[in-house]
Image (cartoon, rainbow, N blue to C red):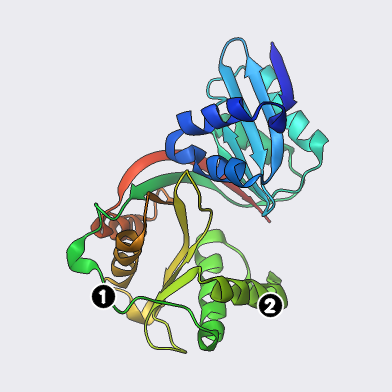
Amino acid sequence: MLSRRPLWDDEAAALDLAKGAGVHGAYVRNALAAGDGDGFLFACDSAGPGLVWIGPRGNLVVLGGEQLPPASVTGIVDHVFTLRLPWRIAMGPADLVDALRQRSVVPPLVCREQVYYQGSAQTAAAALVRDDMRRAQRADRDRLVQATLLLNASDLNLDPARVDRRWLRDTIDERIADGSTCVLGPVGGPLCKLDYGSDGPGGLMLEGVFTFAEHRGQGLAAALVASCLRAAPGAVLLHVGQHNHPARAAYERAGMQAAGSCRLLLLG
């Protein structure tokens, strides 16, 4: 039997689930601490409790729900669509994420396994840490726009022509203003970049790691990630496609270790 109740009706239970989920619960732990997002808790007699969290950036995260009977999976997916909360990216157990994909009328751009990586200042590869890592500046904006479009096309199958340039520039300007983009390379011409995403008691999530093609093979991504690890006060996390072996090798060289996995769905 499946039961459901609003997420914020029992914040303590939601936090226990987020902590118990390890790295996969980081987004939810950080969101609970910040009071962000919405969703619901669920419980099934045969599979135990879980939750669905939907954040303000369109992320949907499912914690728990492994080995649910088909009827319970259907009930959870029905409730997601009943809530009418906007989401575009879903992460969680394969059965539930696949059911979300089948129910959505929007075609998927990506549906694949993601691997979580975790590291810290103590695990950072000391030999790779760079003292010339810097925060992005306004002069870097055009180069960062180009990097984001190229990354979205190669990793997420997102056609650059479909990206709202004004929205993208505004997003990059916000990251520059709050210091959440780090780069290696000269002002106005970064060679490699990454972004700081969700942050809080669950850890700091790195996103958008990208090296321009003409500068690959020089260890820049590993060096940038190692430098961010060394500067971080706590746990640093990221996730990457299971079959993206060059990126995974770079993160491992930087001092990160695989720490979990989930299914990822990105809608068009």
Label 2 crowd (10 A; few <14 / some 14-19 / many >=20): few
Q: Is residue 119 visible?
A: yes
Q: What percent of the width, then of the height, locates residue 238?
A: 43, 52
Q: What percent of the width, then of the height, locates residue 213?
A: 39, 77
Mark 1 → mark 2, Cα distance in angstroms: 30 Å
Position of residue 164 relative to residue 74, above or below, is below
SS for dot 2: helix
In the foreground, 124 or 218 = 124
Give whichever of discs 1 and 2 has the lower sequence position: 2
- Residue type for callout 1: Gln
Answer with left or right where residue 200 lies relative to residue 125. right
Label 1 crowd (10 A; few <14 / some 14-19 / many >=20): few
- Residue type for callout 2: Arg
Q: Mark 2 sits on what residue?
A: 165
Q: What percent of the width, then of the height, locates residue 40?
A: 70, 30
Position of residue 250 relative to residue 145, above or below, is above
Answer with left or right where residue 201 lies relative to residue 246. right
| Residue at screen point 66% across, 44% down | 35
Res 153 → quadrant? bottom right
| Residue at screen point 37% across, 83% down | 185
Q: Quadrant of the N terminus?
A: top right
Q: Mark 1 sits on what residue?
A: 218
Q: Is residue 149 visible?
A: no
| Residue at screen point 68% across, 56% down | 268
Q: Are marks 1 and 2 in contact (CB under 8 Å)?
A: no
